[in-house]
Image (cartoon, helix red, strand yellow):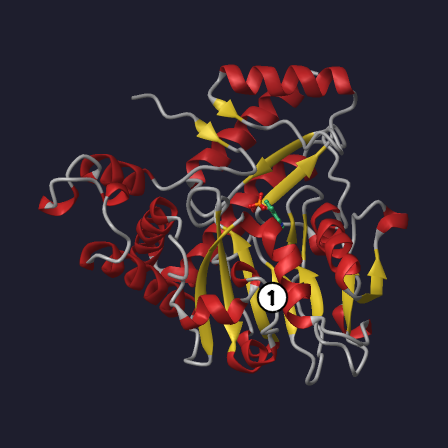
Amino acid sequence: MNRIVNFSAGPSTLPLSALQETAAELPDYRGAGMSLIEMSHRGKQYMAVQSEAAALVKSLLGLSDRFTVLFLGGGATLQFSMVPLNLLGAGKSCDFTLTGAWAGKAFADAAKVGKVNVLFDGKAQNYTTLPDPTTLTVSPDAAYLHMTSNETIGGIQWRDWPDTGAVPIVADMSSDIMSRRLPLEKFGLIYAGAQKNLGPAGLALAIVRDDVLARCSDELPAYLGYKIHAKNDSMYNTPPVFCVYMLGKTLRWLEALGGLDAAEALAEERSGLVYAAIDESNGYYRCPVDPNVRSKMNVVWRLPSETLEKQFVAEAEARGLSGLKGHRSVGGCRASLYNAMPVEGAKALADFMKAFAGRA
Ligand SMILES: *Cc1c(COP(=O)(O)O)cnc(C)c1O
């Protein structure tokens, strides 16, 4: 076995223990004579896996009983439409912060469903910065304020959250969920695609507070309604069983690591190593992002030319440092440093960056 250091933005690196346990259990799940992905989702064994996964989500995040944890298909992208379809009924509007590519996609879907007010648009600064949250004023009658906690492509991340009074924050946390503690009282709905910090692609986690759930539409086609999924414990249809199973293993690994406090400290350490390599390069590497909002999950940077960027990515790849090419829409380089990235991986990248710049 020769595992590379995988900086891919998503799907992305997962804990080795989760992969190995899955591999060992796959042909014959705990004496069942079949794998977990071949058995009925309504059987005892799968039901136990799913309820343990939901319990881990609750305990790691510290969710009160007011929150319902849902496992849904369609990735985070289906949430871009489910959120407005459920919460933007006739005559309702919502507020948005346009902070980058992912917020833009969520905005476009919401605008097809109802009225959207833009509180902040980072386009003029190329989405490299975020406003001071205390300067954001939500519309008092907004159904919700949508925020993208971490822009995976642009490499910016909210540190603090606005005061929104009775207006719930709906947050896309796909690329930084479970990487830090959150002031949960601010959030009415949190959703995340699983393939960055939680498990395989295809699954979305949605965490809905009771008052927000109560407001959700009853008029939608079945799969689109949060209430249907909540009423059926995410078993309205066949859940993405393999994804839920691996999410459970990933979260058990995170719990053993020390939960969100440990995740936060490690994220600080990993990203700190790479940002230091950028900042101490005498301008050879340049991070285009406002230093106050630098992401601890996705670090982006440029080299003096695109030719050098290509060479950097290729040489890194040859050394087992994989997936450092920036998103095709913005170019440059990007290192995604999710929970399962070992600190040694970030250290190896920082060392390579120093050596590469030293040769210039
Ligand atoms: C990856 C990502 C998505 C899209 O997730 P899918 O599962 O591919 O739909 C949405 N939002 C953010 C912030 C992401 O990082």
| Residue 314 figure quarter | top right
Q: Nearer the viewer, residue 199 or 130?
A: 199
**Residue drawn where x is 59% and y is 28% of the image:** 324
Q: Residue furthest right?
A: 124
Q: Nearer the viewer, residue 180 or 149?
A: 149
Please state if 58 lies on the left or on the right of 249 as rendered.
Answer: right
Q: What amino acid type should be assigned to the residue bearing mark 1?
A: Leu
Q: Nearer the viewer, residue 272 or 184?
A: 184
Please state if 76 lies on the left or on the right of 67 as rendered.
Answer: right
Give the image location of residue 194, x and y in percent: 48, 49
Which residue does the numbered mark 1 point to in the structure image? 220
Give the image location of residue 295, x and y in percent: 64, 50
Element carrying mark 1: loop
**Residue drawn where x is 45% and y is 72% of the image:** 68
**Residue drawn where x is 68% and y is 85% of the image:** 166
Asked if 146 appears above or below 343 in the picture, the reply is below
Give the image location of residue 247, x and y in percent: 37, 50
Instruction: Name the quadrant of the N terminus.
Output: top left
Q: Is mark 1 within 8 Å of ligand 1?
A: no
Note whether residue 149 is visible. no
| Residue 113 figure quarter | bottom right
Q: Nearer the viewer, residue 53 or 13?
A: 53
Q: Residues within 10 Å of mark 1 (few under 14, many from 20)?
A: some
Asked if 220 appears above or below 81 in the picture, the reply is below
Instruction: Name the quadrant of the C terminus.
Output: top right
Asked if 280 appears above or below 295 in the picture, the reply is above
* Figure label count: 1
